[in-house]
Image (tube, rainbow, N blue to C red):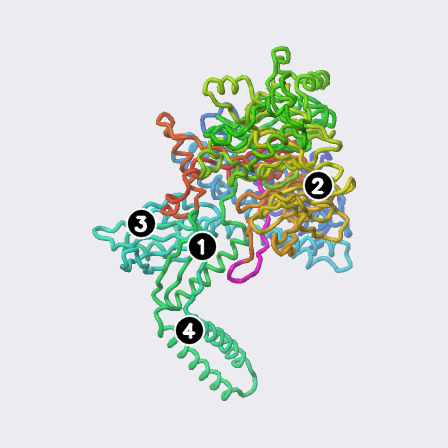
Amino acid sequence: MRRDCLKLRLSDPSPGSLSFHASDSEEESSDRGSRSSRSGVDEPHALPATVTAAQDTRTHVVVELYETEKSYVEALEILVKKYLQPLKSPENAGLLDAFLVDEIFYQVPGILNVHQVFLEQLRRRLEQWDLQQKVGDVFLDVFTQPTVMDTYMSFINNLKKAKETIKTASSSRPAFAKFLDAMARDHKGKLSLDNLLIKPVQKFPSYKLLIQRLIKHTDQSHPDHKLLLEAQKEIHDLLELINCTERESLELEQQQQTLRELEQMIEGLSNLVTLDRMFLRHEMVTMPSAQGTIKDRALFLFNDTLLITSVKRRTGTIKKPTPTYQSTIASQMEGNKYKLLMRISLADLEIVKAKDENLRRIMHEVETLTEDVNTLTQISENVAALHTQHVQLEEIVREMLHNLNRQLSERQNSDTQLCYMEISLNTSNGPENLTIIYPKAEKRSNWEELINETKQKLCVYGQERPAPEFLSPVPIRKTRAGLQFTCAAPTLPPKGQSPDVWVCNSDGYVGQVCVLTLTPKPQVTSCNGVCNARILCVACVPPAPALTRQQTLDIPSTSSLNSTSSVKPGISISDPDDSCKNIRLDSSSSSDEEDDGSSTSENQDAQSERSQESATIRLHSSLTASLGNHRTTLTPNHSKSLSTPHTGQSIQVHPVMKSSSNPAVDKQAMGINSGTLSSPASRQSSEDSGTTANQPTMWLGTEDGCIHVYNCLDNIRIKKNKVKLQHNSGVHSIVYVEGKVFVALGNGDLVVYCRDIDGSWSERSTIPVGTGSSPVSSMLLSGGKLWCATHASIKIINPHSLQVDETFQISSETKPISHMAVAGGTIWLSLHNAAQLRCYNSSSREQLAEINITPQVTKMLHGCDDIIRQHKAACLRVTALLAHRDTLWVGTSAGVLLTAPLHNSPNARTGVFTVPHLTGITYGHTGHVRFLTIVENPAAQKQPAKTTQTSLKTKALSRRSTNAEKLQKQAEPTQSNKETLIISGGDGHEDFRSSSSTEDAGREDSTNHLLLWRV
């Protein structure tokens, strides 16, 4: 079409079927009509006479814009109506699987919707055309929508995969190939499916050219001029983003191909290819062996891993892999055979600085000379740019540079020690050092610099550990309207068995416990009301340590205890017995208390009364008096703290999950002794074995000041008889540490329960930590001390002396601390109703970092509706906090979960604390994240009957391992027999990858969901 002689004419005089197009020739008009009929696009209404009579260039360009847009929409409609819909129809079901059809045409319907709207807006503007009409705002209205960018980016990222699917399906399915050929022949331009799919990539360059022409022919005083300039910028940015995405996609494919080639060439190497892994460099080096000989080795450096392989000269016929892209790695490696020796995570690697003074002096001289050479090189470049005579100056600089290079070369070659690099590996058995000898000192220096830079990037982008593996969402249906998650904690199971997770719900009137079992698959086995108040916290208390035979003989009998005078009150939890004054509370229910498992608010008062009648707590004084000369402190060295997830803090690994050096303690770790809270099953087992079974317990703290204690192994559906400890204020947090249970109350008091020698619990002391207006909002264990957050300060309590050792102020703000988490030498915390995280050094109390979570949360919400996104951003705050190993988990009020790699102390080399980079997780909740908790679950044992399943699981676990195979064999046996699960609880379930609304959106918003990740 000739743009300089574009003319408009009416194609049909009837008002109902008028259309417009550029008049070129009768043949082109006929072709356009044929194309429209083939694509099924309805002809638009005719334009007013003012448009058809216009002869100015600006109008011609707008008409051309409309025509090209109409042609583009027709092409997209062909993809949808001639390809997508027929292939998805039942009569063509055999041509191609539905999921492959969706893969090929991914985001095409979304792109069509965008441009149908744009085309309609252009048509309306042309129908009302005058000299002052605008089109720039139409561009801005359509192409500034976040969904447009997301849709195009998703399409481009998927385009290569779509083309590969077409190619594979065409070769394997002849009927599908015939279908494609028939559609191409039917198309006016004989365009194939591949040619049509490339059109979205080619669209934005044409927009850019048309807008430039519009700006050229639009006067600056025209109301559309400013809008067109803005539209030009938006289209330019979109085009740059598309081009960048294309380049990244190509680079990613090249990188993936390189990884695949390396995986084929290195014997014993597997699971190397991941989307976020990048090959950086390889080098031939030597390493001293244990026998003292020097062995040839090869180093392969990636952005997160270092591989060390053996090197042998290849003999016989050499099979060259055929590289898909221009890659030199295959040609460089073709003459040798490589076998994997070690696979090391860069996060576990540190370069050791030289200790020899002479060597350190030489290295310092080399570094200084290198800096001087770089400086003189810059000076030389600046001198060359002078306009005045500078011959003498240039000669002086050249001579100095020559001398420095000579000195540098002499220093580098003067001592072979400069070619040595010692690295320290952080293994499960402690540090392990390796020595690497490079061919030249310069290469050693370059490798040291590259490794340090790569490790720094790992700190920033958090790639040192694989992303958490999402397992599944578990919906929990509400038995009462308004039930919301409040907290959760895992139980302590018998050794080798999987724990359950007790998940607490409340609506303000009823407290409910749902039991989540993890094997054979995560599912909720029961959901029952346990009290008439909101459950605020839950913690698991391990059983008491097993007593030696001598300790058992030294304990006075119950009858002798009852005859002694009182000294200090205690609480004993055991069976009711009229012959003794201390009341033993049994958690097992009698026959009249068992029911069908239903639990409603109406019968809970009666249940509570029966519980109090059958299980009461009497303060007895005889216990402490008679044990005065027999008491011993039972504080196993393997005790770990368990804290309520409601406070958002870390829950340490259960004692049952980590074996102790003490066999007796490992077999029966901390808990309630002698007849405590025993079920009929456990009593029967005790009678059969001749010993009393010790059991861990679950402590549930409620808003009305009660602590309800259950056996972990009890079936909560039928066990109604429980221990009930009443306090005068709400129970906000419960933490177990070293044989004591610390209970934070709403009035600011910290109540401490200590275990007596017989395993019973006594309320020993009350520590005034906060006030009624500033109660303890969070507790955690750090450095053997209990950290209690009250308002904007933290009080550090010695768990042995029960004294406040230190108090320090976090900030002068009025916002109190809401959540805390500990990671090595750092404490992370959030403030009430704030979207910031703060990090403090646990030793110096120095603030190390402050991170705003808003940018990352906003990025994850890009696909949400504008109103929803604005609302979530306006009230954004941290709602849960959990630190596990080297990762910080952050739950937010927007439902988005964030993770960040943790570095517990400043870098040993630089002394600088690296602020971690937050990363959003694909899956989250529609509403608030209510809690985060962690579960150590024993891994399934290998069984011959399930070889395939075990093999897949082993491969999955091996993918997560970043240490070398040699180091893996040295790891603790218990570590390889368990898996770690992170569980989040919240309102609804959301996949944040989806950028467009679907029919299912919002359907599960009101349903509470548990989300499980394997880490």
Check residue 792 for magenta coloring. Answer: no
Q: Is residue 72 above or below residue 402?
A: above
Badge 2 amino acid? Ile
Question: Sequence-wise, which precedes: disc 3 or disc 2?
Answer: 3
Q: Is residue 717 above or below residue 861?
A: above
Residue 973: x and y in percent read 41, 39
User: Residue at label 3?
Assistant: 339
Name which residue type carries label 1: Leu
Query: Relative to the observer, which residue lies in front, 215 or 855?
Result: 855
Question: In the image, what residue type sits under mark 3?
Answer: Lys
Mark drawn on residue 349: 1
User: What range of the chain is rendered magenta?
Assistant: 907-922
- Sequence-wise first label, 1 or 2: 1
- Residue 607, given in percent of the width and then of the height, sits at 69, 17
| Alpha carbon distance from label 4 to label 1 | 24 Å
| 107 horizontally vs 143: left or right | left
For disc 4, the marked residue is 362
Q: Nearer the viewer, mark 3 or mark 2?
A: 2
Of all residues, the one furthest to the left in this rendering is 316
What is the number of the mark on residue 767? 2
Q: CA distance from mark 3 to mark 2?
A: 62 Å
Question: Can you name the residue that lies furthest to the top here?
Answer: 592
Give the crowd class for mark 1: few <14, some 14-19, many >=20 residues within 10 Å.
Answer: many
Question: Which residue is located at x 38 percent, y 35 percent?
Answer: 171
Label 3 or label 1, whichever lies nearer to me, is: 1
Disc 1 versus disc 2: nearer the observer = 2
Most foreground residue, 693 or 183: 693
